[in-house]
Image (cartoon, rainbow, N blue to C red):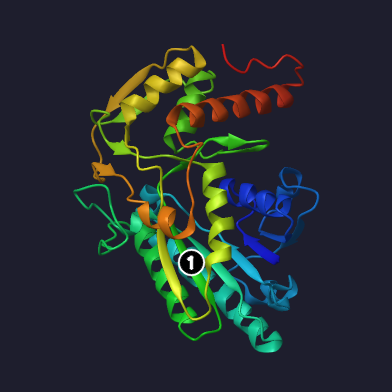
Amino acid sequence: MRILVTGASGFVGGVTADLLSAAGHQVTALVRDASARVRLSRMVEVVQADLLDPRQLAAAGVSRGFDGVCHLAALTRVRESRETPLRYYAANVTGTINLLAALDAGTRATGVAPRFVFGSSCAVYGDTGTSPIPETRTPQPTSPYGASKLAAEQAVAYQASTGRLGAVVLRSFNVAGAVGSHTDRDSSRIIPAALGVASGRRDAFRVNGDGASIREYVHVVDMARAYLTALRATVPGRCAVYNVGSGVGVSVSDVLTTVESVTGRDLPRVTLPAVPEPRALIADSRRIRADLGWNSPSSTIEKIVEDAWRSTAVLEAVAAGRSDVPIVS
């Protein structure tokens, strides 16, 4: 298939683009920053455009008639979204609508109804109070980020209902790990932040509250495989929703202990006041496993941390011009 991947300069988007290319698809990566070229397979076509500018989307050929689209471009920080809600609605809602409009123009011109996989988030559920969370749980987002993702989901579903799109929505629950040159560079997330302390780039890990908050983590390779699997499952006129998660809850304290074990280094901690956020977010992912046959063999916290640490060490060694790469001490 000819597949467009938006957000391919990002962590999950880059892995997804490379995986689709390796599977034999003709992949076009839509990025805002052309420097993403160096992290993507040479087989991937890279085009540059801003989803907020329909003219740039037209110039990039988004309306050419793609068979499939994986839409991962988004702003993703929950706490930041509370400070800049309009920016999040513009990127996540308006950007999605502009993309859908460009694709619809292509559909009307070519008659091809694309397979569309939308990257959403567990943030749409809000503070549910109980876990694991099934897809049948009524979304009640408690942040502009979650609300913007839910609004974008609804736009995708309504467009699918016209019959000019077949869609799958994937709600992810903390993607982590690394593969090749693709590593999570967002230091606001727990694992990159903890590895930053282990590597000496940060002085201490700041724990909000008692460290008992429970989250689950999906390896980026397993997450990218979910996009590949979902593309095959779309049906024109329908929009299906799936949680994508390991189903295994891990506390903040457990993550830090795993980082210490993998790296062989102590992590100094600073305790800060608790912030308002769900106490536990764990996915009920039985539906995607049953319907699509997806599974998550790489999504143990140990492998996630090991791969992220290995990638961090390799990239730092390359940047420093070293040939000796201390992967695990």
Look at the image and tell me whether residue 72 can be seen: no
Residue tagged 1: 168
Residue 320: image quadrant is: top right
**Could you tell me residue 285's position as x and y percent?**
37, 51
Q: Quadrant of residue 179?
A: top right
How far across and down, in percent of the image, does residue 303 sit?
Answer: 50, 29
In the visual, does 19 lie left or right of 305? right
Determine the secondary structure under disc 1.
strand
Seen from this angle, which residue lies furthest right?
A: 42
Q: Quadrant of the N terminus?
A: bottom right
Where residue 26 sits: x, y (%)? 75, 61
**In this rendering, position of residue 243 left or right of residue 181:** left
Residue in front for this viewpoint, 149 or 158: 158
Say which quadrant the C terminus sits in: top right
* Label 1, residues with CA under 10 Å away: few <14, some 14-19, many ≥20: many
Q: Is residue 103 above or below residue 286?
A: below
The relative height of residue 273 versus residue 153 in the rendered view (above or below) is above
For this view, does 88 lie left or right of residue 55? left
Residue closer to the observer: 112 or 183: 112
